[in-house]
Image (cartoon, helix red, strand yellow):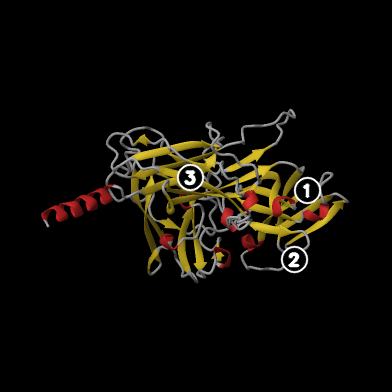
């Protein structure tokens, strides 16, 4: 009996030691960590030479684990809605899993994680390739059991095959949607797509436009589906133009800078040094990263995770719940980022790695059937301004009939307003 109890205690102890948590998972461009994770193959620079600076992304995360675990990263090609594709011909077997992850120890004195990981993909070992363009999802799993998922992330791969150009304009929506004039002022994007021979012009019917880094709230425009605010038309027999008229410019994002160790020391609950956030409905914001983030890069005891309390007070009631959304949660509406409300005061404590983050507040009428069906008001708290500087990322889809058919991304353009 004694031996049996010792055995049980030993098993429980070992199990406790092997608890694993992934923290601070980020994916971004190798060019700059504030840029979104977009790989662009076959693009040319201004001299007509292939530009390889866009050929990689970085995956980075920290790990809470008493023992160094045996993990892997599984890459999956997805459809336009980020759903993994089941087509066996597009699953890239043999080059879709990265194993033998190399972890570094956390800096001496750091308490909130044990190991850190940072890796370029495609990798130097040649384990991972991306032979097909499209949206990709990756899973961080146990090497021996890929059902144990500890984290997931997303990125986009483009094979530049179609010439694409894009332009920006300002426009006043003329149907008096709001008594507030600023809310009727929108940003207009025009995209020209040239379909080269021998591609079938009728298989190119969609583009996707992402404002800043809100990949999960993008706009897909179908050439054959016309509405008052988005439609397509022919400029030439092989050139299609897509128009989106009613983007809210919004406001410049709020920015949280936790890098100052004197203002924001370790081991305490932190709040803003400038006071509680208030509505910016009629106040223009300052400079931001267009949705990105920077991590604190010094390898010292301050490279920690901190508990920070977001606080917001409003002089009026809103119809819905208030969420905080930003570069720390991939600009996604998530139940755990819904703020607690007491009257017109809202608060939420979030555990963040020391760094600089873009964020904002949104008003949400909840519908959890899908993120696409959320009724989200992006401007009720933050306001809307014609002068807001945004980045728009444009992806051109082509319905490729090969390998059983899939929507490949054959063109890319970026517009800065």
Mark 1 surroundings: few (<14), some (14-19) or many (≥20) residues within 10 A: many
Answer left or right for 214 relative to 271.
right
Residue 386, percent across and down? 64, 53
| Local SS, label 2 | loop
Query: Could you tell me which quadrant the N terminus lies in?
Result: bottom left
| Local SS, label 3 | strand
Residue at horizontal 48 percent and vertical 51 percent from the top: 152
Compared with residue 297, is residue 137 higher up or lower down, i.e. above or below?
A: below
Viewer-side residue, 193 vs 361: 193
Q: Which mark is residue 172?
A: none
- Pointer 2 and pointer 1: residues touching (CB < 8 Å)? no
Mark 3 surroundings: few (<14), some (14-19) or many (≥20) residues within 10 A: many
Query: Disc 2 or disc 1, which is closer to the eye?
Result: 1
The residues tagged by marks 2 and 3 sit, at their Cα atoms, a distance apart of 41 Å
Residue 201, percent across and down? 82, 52
Residue at horizontal 68 percent and vertical 58 percent from the top: 220
Query: Disc 2 or disc 3, which is closer to the eye?
Result: 3
- Sequence-wise, the earlier of marks 2 and 1 is 1
**Which of the 4 quarters of the picture holds residue 233?**
bottom right
- Sequence-wise, the earlier of marks 1 and 3 is 3
Q: Which residue is mark 2?
A: 227
Q: Which residue is mark 1?
A: 193
Visible residue check, residue 102: yes
The residues tagged by marks 1 and 3 sit, at their Cα atoms, a distance apart of 35 Å
The residues tagged by marks 2 and 1 sit, at their Cα atoms, a distance apart of 19 Å
Answer left or right for 397 relative to 143.
right
- Sequence-wise, the earlier of marks 2 and 3 is 3
Compared with residue 222, is residue 37 higher up or lower down, i.e. above or below?
A: above
Visible residue check, residue 356: no
**Which of the 4 quarters of the picture holds residue 345?**
bottom left
Q: Which residue is mark 3?
A: 73
| Local SS, label 1 | strand
């Amino acid at each position: 009996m004694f031996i049996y109890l010792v055995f049980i205690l030993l098993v429980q102890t070992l199990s406790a030691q092997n608890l694993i948590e992934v923290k601070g998972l980020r994916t971004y461009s190798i060019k700059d960590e504030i840029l979104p994770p977009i790989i662009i193959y076959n693009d040319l620079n201004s001299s007509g030479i292939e530009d390889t600076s866009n050929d990689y992304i970085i995956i980075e995360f920290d790990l809470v684990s008493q023992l160094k675990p045996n993990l892997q990263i599984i890459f999956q090609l997805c459809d336009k809605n980020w759903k993994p594709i089941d087509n066996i011909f597009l699953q890239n077997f043999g080059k879709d899993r990265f194993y033998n992850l190399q972890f570094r120890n956390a800096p001496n004195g750091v308490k909130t994680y044990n190991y850190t990981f940072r890796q370029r993909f495609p990798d130097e070992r040649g384990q991972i390739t991306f032979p097909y363009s499209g949206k990709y999802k990756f899973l961080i799993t146990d090497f021996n059991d890929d059902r144990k998922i500890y984290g997931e992330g997303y990125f986009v791969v483009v094979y530049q095959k179609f010439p694409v150009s894009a332009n920006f304009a300002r426009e006043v929506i003329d149907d008096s949607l709001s008594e507030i004039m600023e809310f009727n002022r929108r940003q207009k994007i025009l995209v020209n797509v040239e379909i080269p021979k021998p591609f079938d012009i009728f298989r190119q019917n969609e583009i996707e436009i992402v404002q800043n880094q809100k990949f999960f709230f993008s706009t897909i425009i179908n050439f054959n589906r016309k509405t008052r605010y988005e439609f397509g038309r022919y400029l030439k027999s092989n050139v299609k133009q897509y128009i989106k008229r009613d983007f809210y410019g919004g406001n410049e994002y709020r920015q949280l800078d936790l890098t100052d160790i004197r203002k924001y020391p370790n081991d305490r609950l932190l709040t803003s040094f400038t006071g509680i956030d208030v509505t910016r409905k009629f106040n223009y914001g300052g400079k931001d990263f267009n949705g990105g983030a920077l991590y604190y890069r010094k390898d010292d005891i301050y490279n920690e995770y901190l508990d920070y309390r977001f606080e917001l007070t409003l002089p009026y009631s809103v119809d819905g719940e208030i969420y905080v959304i930003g570069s720390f949660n991939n600009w996604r509406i998530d139940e755990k980022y819904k703020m607690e409300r007491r009257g017109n005061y809202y608060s939420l404590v979030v555990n963040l790695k020391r760094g600089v983050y873009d964020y904002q507040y949104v008003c949400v009428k909840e519908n959890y059937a899908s993120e696409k069906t959320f009724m989200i008001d992006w401007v009720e708290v933050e306001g809307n301004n014609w002068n807001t500087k945004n980045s728009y990322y444009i992806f051109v889809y082509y319905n490729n009939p090969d390998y059983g058919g899939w929507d490949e991304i054959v063109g890319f353009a970026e517009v800065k307003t």
